């Protein structure tokens, strides 16, 4: 008995940190609150039928985005804790161990559980609508993808209160991340959480490729696709090639840690540097997985609010293809300092700089899209416009980092930190906020308040520059990343204080955005037209929010900017009044979430190295798969009367 | 155009100058040796080229966003169906390519140069560097002494660091003297640095290696040869010996103060040599024609690999 108590207090629950006790209490309270609210309002059945078992791409997209926002909150809190700790030299706000855990979870969460699901959520919401499809190619698989990401994220976050967080950095370099140097379950959480989410992402990649290649509306040739759909296609191809590398690398390190393997140990013939290589062979394409959809979002938004065709459409596509190819050829620039020799470093330095060429072309094409246009400064467009100068700063410092010999002086310094936050925030985060504002009416039927949105925008963008620009200089002063404190007398404090202030400004901006969500839900302008922005692409051709079947009749595409062309040639009315037929749709299923639950059990068991629990979980996964393969699920039809009624209620047909 | 270039260069230099005037140490931009100096020139050149890009984009951005706002008075020039322009797109493909070439050539030259002794006319002083959890160990094979968490080097003489790690990897960085390189278990890397004049510089661990990583800062004390020799003499006469047992104790995870030892165990040199031989073997397998292999082995015995042809292949 005392053994069990011992285990629970020493190894299972994280103890001894007031902040973690606070987290424990709030988790319990929030869970109870959710249960009470759902029970009181009798919403359990609604939750299960409408959301948890859904295979509707729009609802799955919304769930991705909600989860990503929650993760943005968690990662943001991590960031602010770090900024507070670094404000002054020798602060004791966080201790070394706690700081190391926090920068690890901050990086992992922001990249894998915030940026990617946010973009995949937006893709889910908008892409099928943009190509005039009724759903993705494999709606059931789409639900599995989401639930795998979700349980992966939950497993990873559980480490905060149970067992202890990973503490070897989001890159988890070996041999530090090996069992000998990092005992405990933290790194296991990292490995299994990422593994689950990664499998989900890989399935998403396959799903999107097939959807785009096979399910476009008649007349939509590849070269008539919206730019966001193009970016999704290219991103998905990168996912399909890059994610297996991550899966294999994580599996190898899991074998090392759980079963005493020696793939990456420093002893017994292991090769620690192989991890570094494998990680970045996935990791660098990953950077483009989170930036290319952002480019797509900006392309669509800039062209919409300029009221003008995207400048150089073909070149925009070719440049994305070029970027995707190059993204696989630059990975060693993450470790120029490994001593691979001058030849290797020069080649990879040049290939890295080469990426700036297609990226530069895109920047100029966006600028020229606005030439002789009519720019409307809506919030969605403000984020997109701010992206250009801010991303250029991150881009040019990227080129500076690519200069191998100079990189020896920037490597792992705050110069690097400033650079990648500059590209990831100005690129990915601005795109997420832009896309969220832009597609919000399509998801919820009302627009977000523009005034509050502008407050968020200005406070966040100013805060972001105040936070990260000083860090370039801190890098020149010799400040290295992942350092939980620094000695006094180096003159690092003033810039760190400024940086912390900027961090909090970003936090305030985010809080205003959250308030805006609440405010707009209550008072926001309803979008009754389905086309609040005078849009150009097909998602604006249907109602807001779109009905389950997306389009009563699939539109016929005759040009790029399909909806713009329909409006221009007055075809909209004629299209809406075409005779309506029965619509074939996929059935909801509870199995994806149940399968994900078993995956979670397996992941949790393996994290604690309880092999039998892991085996039970995997057996459950197998059972759900077997049940699926014996199922004869041909979907259902929405009858034409019902479709007609829905369309009439939306005022689209008389 | 030329006028613009000079003015940009002036802006860069004056901004850097102003920031330096605030009185803080900015070691990367205040190089104290030939290696850091080469990197500094490369950094300045890249900042200069990149500022050109920034100025062009920012000006274009400002003008376009202001001029074509929807609320402007005269919107006659609105041209919603404009498709693109081959000529313009070709222009902004070719200009970035030229800029990349302008950057790639000096980069490649410097990257190759940094693999070599920065002052070939002088014989480099050799220091063996070992990173451990959370301390730096420095052996001075020419003088047979050892120091922990402090590094003494002769000024105005190139220093060759032969580096490895116990356990987790790290990165050895002295910003004022020049860029860093990883230290890795069972492997050796090599880094040349040189201090122009005597002084104390900040030494950093740049790659996270566990809990007390932040405490791995160390002082680099460059002294003229005479003072350096005196320091060696003093260490030899006053400091204790480092035994293998003590060494094994020392490399266990801990934070320790500055220490010096009058001697260190032979095994450490042998260990370093074994690492180096292993890397040589790995390389000669892939390059069987490496005729200098035997010579390499001989020379690595006395820990001096300067001028060796196989230098590149060591990494």
Image: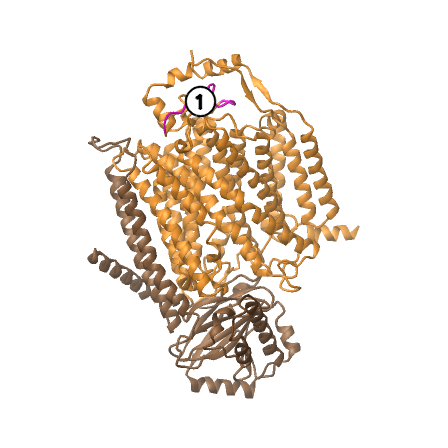
**Is residue A553 part of the magenta span, yes or no?**
yes
**Residue A608 image offset from top left, x and y in percent:** 69, 50
Task: Return the residue at label 1.
Answer: A543
**Residue B150 image offset from top left, x and y in percent:** 50, 75
Q: Is mark 1 on a helix, strand or loop?
A: loop
Provide the letter of the chain coloured brown: B
Is residue A508 visible in the rendered image? The answer is: no
What is the quadrant of residue B80 in the picture?
top left
User: Would residue B251 be found to the left or right of residue A371 on screen?
Assistant: right
**Is residue A302 part of the magenta span, yes or no?**
no
**Residue A285 image offset from top left, x and y in percent:** 49, 48
Residue sitting at x 50%, y 30%: A214
Magenta span of residues? A547-559
Q: Chain A is drawn in which colour?
A: orange
The quadrant the N terminus of chain B occupies is: bottom left
- For the residue pair B217 and A413, the one nearer the viewer reads as A413
Indicate whether A259 appears above or below A450.
below
């Amino acid at each position: 008995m005392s053994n069990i108590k011992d285990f629970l207090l020493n190894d299972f629950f994280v103890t001894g940190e007031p902040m973690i006790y606070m987290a424990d209490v709030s988790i319990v309270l929030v869970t109870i609150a959710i249960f009470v609210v759902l029970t009181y309002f009798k919403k359990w059945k609604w939750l299960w039928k409408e959301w948890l078992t859904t295979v509707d791409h729009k609802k799955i997209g919304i769930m991705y985005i909600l989860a990503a926002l929650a993760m943005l909150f968690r990662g943001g809190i991590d960031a602010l804790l770090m900024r507070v700790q670094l404000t002054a030299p020798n602060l004791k706000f966080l201790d070394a161990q706690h700081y190391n855990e926090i920068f690890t979870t901050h990086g992992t969460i922001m990249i894998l559980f915030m940026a990617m699901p946010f973009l995949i959520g937006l893709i889910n919401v908008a892409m099928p609508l943009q190509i005039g499809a009724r759903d993705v190619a494999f709606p059931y698989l789409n639900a599995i993808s989401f639930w795998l990401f979700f349980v992966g994220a939950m497993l990873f976050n559980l480490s905060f209160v149970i067992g202890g967080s990973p503490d070897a950095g989001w890159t988890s370099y070996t041999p530090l991340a090996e069992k000998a140097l990092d005992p405990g379950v933290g790194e296991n959480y990292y490995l299994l959480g990422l593994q689950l989410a990664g499998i989900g992402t890989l399935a998403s990649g396959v799903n999107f490729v097939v959807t785009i290649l096979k399910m476009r509306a008649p007349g939509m040739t590849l070269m008539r696709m919206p730019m966001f759909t193009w970016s999704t296609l290219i991103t998905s191809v990168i996912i399909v090639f890059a994610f297996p590398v991550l899966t294999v690398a994580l599996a190898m390190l899991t074998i090392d840690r759980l079963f005493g393997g020696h793939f990456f140990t420093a002893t017994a013939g292991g090769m620690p540097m192989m991890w570094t290589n494998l990680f970045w062979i996935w990791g660098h394409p990953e950077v483009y997985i989170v930036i290319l959809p952002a480019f797509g979002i900006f392309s669509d938004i800039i062209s919409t609010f300029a009221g003008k065709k995207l400048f150089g459409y073909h070149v925009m596509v070719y440049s994305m293809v070029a970027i995707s190819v190059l993204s696989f050829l630059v990975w060693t620039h993450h470790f120029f300092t490994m001593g691979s020799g001058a030849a290797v470093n020069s080649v990879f330095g040049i290939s890295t700089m080469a990426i700036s060429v297609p990226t530069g072309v895109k920047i100029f094409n966006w600028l020229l899209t606005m030439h002789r246009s009519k720019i409307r400064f809506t919030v969605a467009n403000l984020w997109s416009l701010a992206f250009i100068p801010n991303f250029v700063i991150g881009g040019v410092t990227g080129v500076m980092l690519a200069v191998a010999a100079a990189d020896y002086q920037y490597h792992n310094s705050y110069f690097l930190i400033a650079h990648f936050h500059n590209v990831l925030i100005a690129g990915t985060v601005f795109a997420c906020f832009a896309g969220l504002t832009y597609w919000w009416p399509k998801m919820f039927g009302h627009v977000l308040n523009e005034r509050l949105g502008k407050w968020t925008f200005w406070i966040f963008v100013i805060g972001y520059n105040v936070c990260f620009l000083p860090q370039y200089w801190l890098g020149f002063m010799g400040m290295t990343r992942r350092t939980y404190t620094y000695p006094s007398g180096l003159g690092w404090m003033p810039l760190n204080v400024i940086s912390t202030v900027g961090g909090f400004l970003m936090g305030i901006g985010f809080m205003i955005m959250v308030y805006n969500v609440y405010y707009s839900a209550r008072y926001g302008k309803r979008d009754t037209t389905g086309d609040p922005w005078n849009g150009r692409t097909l998602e604006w051709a249907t109602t807001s929010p779109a009905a389950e079947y997306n389009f009563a009749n699939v539109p016929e595409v005759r040009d790029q900017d399909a909806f713009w062309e329909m409006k221009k040639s007055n075809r909209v009315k004629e299209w809406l009044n075409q005779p309506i037929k029965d619509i074939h749709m996929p059935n909801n299923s509870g199995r994806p979430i149940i399968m994900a639950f078993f995956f979670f059990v397996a992941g949790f068991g393996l994290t604690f190295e309880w092999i039998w629990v892991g085996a039970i979980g995997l057996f459950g996964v197998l059972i759900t798969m077997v049940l699926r393969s014996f199922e004869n699920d041909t979907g259902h039809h929405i009858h034409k009367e019902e479709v007609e009624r829905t369309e009439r209620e939306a005022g689209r047909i008389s | 155009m030329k006028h613009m270039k000079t003015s940009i260069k002036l802006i860069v230099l004056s901004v850097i100058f102003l920031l330096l005037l605030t009185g803080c140490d900015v070691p990367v931009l205040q190089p104290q040796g030939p290696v850091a100096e080469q990197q500094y020139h490369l950094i300045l050149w890249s900042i200069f080229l990149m500022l050109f890009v920034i100025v062009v984009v920012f000006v274009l951005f400002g003008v376009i966003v202001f001029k074509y706002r929807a609320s402007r008075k005269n919107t006659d020039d609105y041209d919603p169906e404009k498709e693109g322009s081959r000529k313009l797109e070709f222009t902004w493909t070719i200009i970035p390519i030229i800029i990349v070439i302008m950057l790639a050539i000096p980069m490649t030259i410097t990257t190759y140069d940094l693999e070599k002794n920065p002052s070939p006319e002088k014989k480099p002083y050799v220091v063996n560097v070992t990173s451990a959890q959370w301390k730096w160990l420095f052996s001075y094979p020419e003088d047979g002494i050892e120091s922990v968490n402090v590094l003494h080097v002769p000024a105005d003489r190139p220093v060759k660091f032969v580096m490895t790690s116990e356990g987790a990897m790290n990165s050895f960085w002295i910003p004022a003297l020049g860029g860093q390189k990883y230290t890795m278990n069972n492997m050796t890397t090599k880094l040349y640095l040189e201090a122009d004049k005597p002084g104390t510089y900040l030494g950093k661990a740049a790659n996270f290696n566990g809990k007390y990583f932040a405490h791995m800062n160390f002082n680099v004390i460059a002294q003229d040869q005479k003072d350096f020799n005196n320091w060696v003499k003093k260490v030899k006469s006053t400091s204790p010996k480092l035994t293998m047992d003590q060494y094994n104790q020392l490399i266990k995870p801990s934070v320790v103060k500055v220490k010096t030892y009058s001697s260190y165990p032979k095994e450490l040199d042998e260990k370093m040599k074994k690492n180096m031989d292993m890397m040589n073997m790995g390389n000669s397998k892939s390059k069987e024609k490496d005729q200098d292999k035997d010579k390499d082995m001989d020379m690595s015995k006395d820990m001096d690999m300067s001028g060796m042809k196989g230098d590149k292949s060591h990494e």
